């Protein structure tokens, strides 16, 4: 399947592929916490909105029993370690697999192509200088670029089944859930700062 120029060639630490810094992992991302994720059904898609906290303890819990995953993480994580938070948008197909993820994190915003057929989790750094705030950008990608993004993640058949007008109708609900999650994050941070 054609995935575009230079698709997924770099391995390991973030490398530049054109203008984008990407890291290709041979492990799947940490699944969303179902209890903390609110879902919107949009035809064959299920879009999850999750308030997410990512740190060393979470990585150890998810991957600690997998020495290969631990080695990949250690080889690629920032020298200062991993500690970030923000809202994640998860794009699942009706097959139950997650194909795209937009992590609107405070310190390291990025998005994922989750290529199950290749066994790859491709992380692309987001550039807020070039693209502005990540939420409007991510919603724009879902509205206008979802088909090629799903194809790049190996979900071309799913992409052909997406009803663009139904998806656009549901994106307002996704944005509302993101705003609610952002409000919850602000409340939590204010409460922890006051304690």
Image: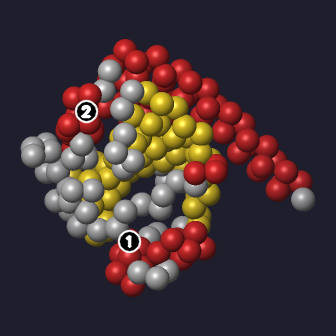
Label tally = 2
Q: Secondary structure at mark 2?
A: helix
List the residue tagged with mark 2: 159
In the image: residue 113, left or right of residue 104: left
Q: Residues within 10 Å of mark 1 (few under 14, many from 20)?
A: some
Tell me: residue 92, above or below residue 177. Answer: below
Identify the residue at horizontal 62%, vertical 57% (top origin): 53
Point out which mark residue 76 bears: 1
Q: Residue at x 52, y 53 (%)?
A: 32
Can residue 46 be seen at all in this image of the molecule?
yes
Residue 60, by quadrant, is bottom right
- Where residue 179 appears, as percent x and y from the top left, is 64, 31
Occupied quadrant, residue 156: top left
Front disc: 1 or 2: 2
Instruction: Name the spot of residue 80 as percent of width and height, x first.
Output: 54, 72
Measured from the top left, where is residue 48 in percent x and y? Answer: 51, 40
Instruction: Say which quadrant the C terminus sits in.
Output: bottom right
Residue 75 at least partly seen: no
Q: Secondary structure at mark 1?
A: helix
Q: Earlier in the sequence, mark 1 or mark 2?
A: 1
* Quarter residue 37 falls in: top right
Residue under the point 37% across and 40% down:
94
Q: Are marks 1 and 2 in contact (CB under 8 Å)?
A: no
Establish if 42 lies above or below 121.
above
Q: CA distance from mark 1 to mark 2?
A: 31 Å
Residue 187 x, y percent position in the rendering:
79, 43
């Amino acid at each position: 399947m054609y995935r575009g120029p230079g698709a997924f060639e770099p391995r390991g630490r973030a490398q530049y592929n054109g203008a984008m810094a990407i890291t290709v992992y041979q492990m799947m991302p940490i699944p969303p916490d179902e209890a903390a994720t609110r879902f919107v059904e949009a035809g064959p898609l299920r879009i999850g909105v999750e308030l997410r906290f990512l740190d060393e303890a979470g990585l150890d819990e998810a991957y600690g029993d997998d020495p290969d995953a631990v080695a990949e993480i250690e080889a690629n994580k920032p020298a200062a370690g991993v500690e970030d938070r923000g809202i994640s948008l998860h794009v699942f197909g009706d097959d139950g697999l997650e194909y795209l993820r937009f992590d609107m994190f405070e310190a390291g915003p990025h998005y994922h192509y989750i290529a199950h057929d290749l066994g790859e989790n491709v992380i692309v750094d987001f550039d807020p200088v070039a693209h502005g705030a990540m939420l409007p950008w991510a919603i724009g990608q879902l509205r206008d670029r979802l088909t090629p993004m799903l194809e790049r993640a190996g979900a071309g058949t799913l992409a052909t089944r997406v009803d663009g007008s139904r998806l656009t109708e549901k994106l307002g609900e996704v944005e509302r859930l993101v705003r609610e999650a952002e409000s919850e994050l602000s409340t939590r941070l204010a409460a922890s700062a006051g304690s």
